[in-house]
Image (cartoon, helix red, strand yellow):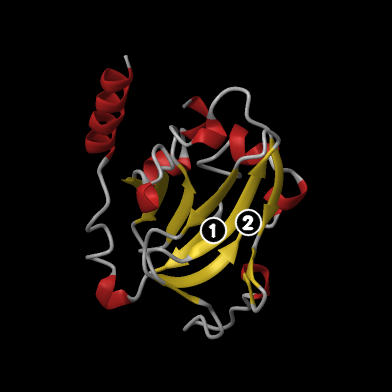
């Protein structure tokens, strides 16, 4: 995890959401900045970050009427931002082996931006998931910002989940 050193480690607290919607190993990481902004990324154990996976496509078009790319935010109060629930889909990713993955917000808040750079260069999602390969930036409501980590795991708790998975598979 040498790529994640620096700003991501210094200013962000890592929180994890394992097995989202009951899908084993589909884990996400929420990097929470001290100013409450949260960056949504793939957790280390996500199948897309495992050896041999190649990303074929990334699509921010969630439904016929909803594209995360159409999110236009303006002003201090972030007018126009799409509001997300914990299980709101952010994007859909297809891998070269035919698997499809839906990436979820994991927290409630306003969608500030999506990472359009991963559309042109999907490899950075795998090479630098905690930095340039992030999925989206979400801003929780001020009054909810202290509670957004309920239901998320700390780094230590997540490592215990990974250890249990390893022990149960061997």
> On the rendered structure, is 88 left or right of 149?
right
- Label 1, on which residue? 136
Which of the numbered marks, if any, corresponds to residue 97?
A: none
Q: Residue at position x 60%, y 35% from top?
A: 126
* Residue 77 percent coordinates (x, y): 47, 84
Q: Are marks 1 and 2 in contact (CB under 8 Å)?
A: yes
Q: Is residue 57 above or below residue 161?
A: below
The spot of residue 58 in percent (x, y) is 68, 51
Q: In which quarter of the image is residue 62?
A: bottom right
Q: Give the class, few, some or many, for how many residues have Cα within 10 Å of label 1's Cα (few <14, many ≥20).
A: many
Q: How many labels does the image show?
A: 2
Q: At x 36% / y 44%, what residue is drawn?
A: 19
Where residue 1 appears, as percent x and y from the top left, is 46, 27
Task: Locate residue 21 relative to residue 113 in the image: left or right.
Answer: left
The residue depicted at 56 percent of the width and 84 percent of the height is 80
Q: Give the quadrant of the C terminus.
A: top left
Q: Earlier in the sequence, mark 1 or mark 2?
A: 2
Q: Which of 153 and 51 is in front in this view?
A: 51
Residue 46 is left or right of residue 59, and the answer is left
Q: Which mark is residue 115?
A: 2
Q: Quadrant of residue 32?
A: bottom left
Pinpoint residue 166: horizontal percent, then vertical percent.
32, 21
């Amino acid at each position: 995890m040498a790529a994640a050193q620096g700003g991501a480690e210094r200013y962000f607290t890592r929180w994890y959401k394992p097995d989202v919607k009951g899908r084993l190993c589909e884990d996400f990481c929420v990097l929470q900045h001290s100013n409450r902004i949260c960056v949504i990324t793939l957790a280390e154990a996500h199948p897309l970050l495992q050896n041999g996976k190649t990303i074929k496509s990334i699509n921010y078009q969630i439904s016929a009427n909803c594209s995360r790319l159409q999110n236009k935010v303006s002003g201090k109060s972030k007018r126009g931002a799409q509001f997300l629930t914990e299980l709101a889909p952010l994007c859909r990713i297809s891998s070269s082996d035919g698997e499809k993955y839906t990436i979820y917000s994991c927290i409630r808040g306003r969608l500030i931006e999506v990472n359009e750079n991963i559309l042109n260069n999907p490899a950075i999602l795998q090479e630098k998931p905690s930095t340039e390969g992030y999925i989206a930036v979400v801003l929780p409501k001020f009054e909810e910002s202290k509670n957004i980590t309920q239901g998320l795991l700390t780094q230590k708790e997540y490592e215990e989940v990974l250890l249990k998975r390893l022990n149960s598979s061997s």
